[in-house]
Image (cartoon, coloured by chain):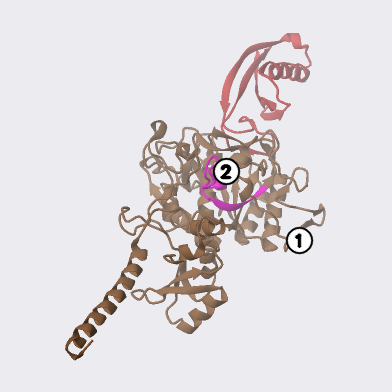
Chain colours: A brown, B red
Amino acid sequence: MNRNNFLPHVALALILILVAAFAGQLRKWQWKRTVRIMPGADKRHDAINNGQIASDESNEFSPPEVLVKFKPGVRAETIERITSGLHDRVEDQIESVPGLEAIDDLDNADAESVALAYRGLPEVEYAEPSYEISVDDAGLGLGPVRPRDPRFAEQWALANDGQNGGKQGADVSAMRAWAVTTGTDKVVVAVLDSGVDYTHSDLAANIWVRPASVAPYEDNELGTIQDFHGYNAIENSADPMDDNGHGTHCAGIIGAEGGNDIGIAGVNWKVQIMPLKFMNAGGFGTTKDAIEAINYVIDRKKHGVNVRVISASWGSTQKSRALDDVIQKAYQEGILFVAASGNSSTNNDRSPHYPSSYNNVISVAALDRNDQLASFSNYGPKSVQIAAPGKDILSTWLGDDYEEHSGTSMATPVVAGVAALVVANEPRISVSELRQKLLASVDKLDALKGKVTTGGRINAAKAVGAE
Amino acid sequence: MAISKDEAAEKARKDLAQRLGVSTSEIKEQSVEEAEFPDMSLGAPAKDEMSGQMITSGWRIRLQAGNQTFEYRANKNQVRLYNYKGQNFVI
């Protein structure tokens, strides 16, 4: 190099530096825009853990796991302290939205669990998993999420594409809801019924187990029950195994494990179902045993179990003040009671059905696959609040099997399941807010005008803010 | 243990004969039909009873004694007497 060609060399060096810098920025832009639909942002971490891809190979373009919006006024030092304390790192600040941080979890934890941890902090406005989104799917909107459970196509209640003569779209918009949340094992739903087959392959992973930190159930008169996963009020024992099938069917609607390549998907892919048995092999039980079972749920709640919903697919025309009292007590403890409106085709405003007609309960009517009120369903513009699919509903059954059944029994756990999804998305929501949110999250139907208070079918996507 | 339609009908006959204080030969079987009931109490809940709100298949058994007709409802799990003197009974 001499004085004559010095400047060209410097210019060339500068150009090369600029090109390299631009290429780096280009790569950054690429991973923010790229992709394909993926139900759950934890697949990459599973792949790492299973040795299917090397962690450095995935980290090269590894997207952030969680998007966290800190409240205005939260300082950078505080954000750093929080993320370090959770063993995370700030991958990127989204400058256009002050306080919005893209955060990478260094523990390879489940994205939903990481988001949940942030949601519980007072400094955080919201937190959500970072979804991978197809650029072919209307830009960065929340595209529907379809589970790979083999019998999902038969679950018209969750996704009605007109199968078996149904009406396309006559469903609870589950697939859009799942783009926001597929549920979490931090939420417990009590299924107060004939018990649950907790060994069913599509339920076992979602059955509540009493944590070691929670003492066994004690009743002054009944003694100590070493409850493991629920309670049997008929025998006052720890075994709520279902010997009828009805409770197992309802449990599957709420939370058959989703995305496990087995059977069906529940409204919640992940949840904790607390089985409670008060109905016998014939499918009926006493008011007294129902009260004992609710008493158990309240006790577990007081001992720290995050039980937020009771699903009650049963009833009769007989009123019980004692049952009403214990249901109100459950509500005061933050537990929403969802009940079947009944199957006598009658108007509950004139002929009440219990427990669905008690205060603070959400009473559920049943719809068929054409968005019509099911012919058997009770209704009531004042006393029945909402409707959900309840005819020809496929769900789990005894013997590791699946069956279709009909009734307001089937509609009830759909609403209970949506309630659990809302809680998964908003863990701090109060029971009254939860009730209001569910009743405000409907698709109004002509068939329900003057039949149910809301005039509508539950919409899970609206309930979790996806629509 | 699951019971059959014939077993349910026979159980109903014996129950009715006992209630009326007559022999089973005086009880005539009018009809035994497949039926769908609104709930798991077969639409015939006993006092203080709650039942699953699922449409339940079973049999409607009509028996005649003298000039009166009595209705029983049954499935593989149970037999019930419907609306006998204003009440329902699990047999």
Could you say where residue A316 lies in the image, as x and y percent from the top left? 61, 39
Residue A65 visible, this angle: no
Residue under label 1, please give it: A215
Relative to A223, residue A378 above or below:
above
Amino acid marked by disc 2: Gly
Q: Numbered disc 2: what chain?
A: A
Give the magenta part as a residue range: A250-275
Q: Nearer the viewer, residue A133 or A375?
A: A133
Residue A202 visible, this angle: yes
Could you say where residue A18 lies in the image, as x and y percent from the top left? 27, 78
On-image quarter of the C terminus of chain A: bottom left
Instruction: In the rendered structure, find residue A252 and report the number of the disc placed on it.
Output: 2
Q: Secondary structure at mark 1?
A: loop
Among numbered discs 1 and 2, the one appearing first in the sequence: 1
Q: Numbered disc 1: what chain?
A: A
Q: Does residue A68 appear to the left or right of A355 in the view shown?
A: left
Q: Is residue A268 magenta?
A: yes
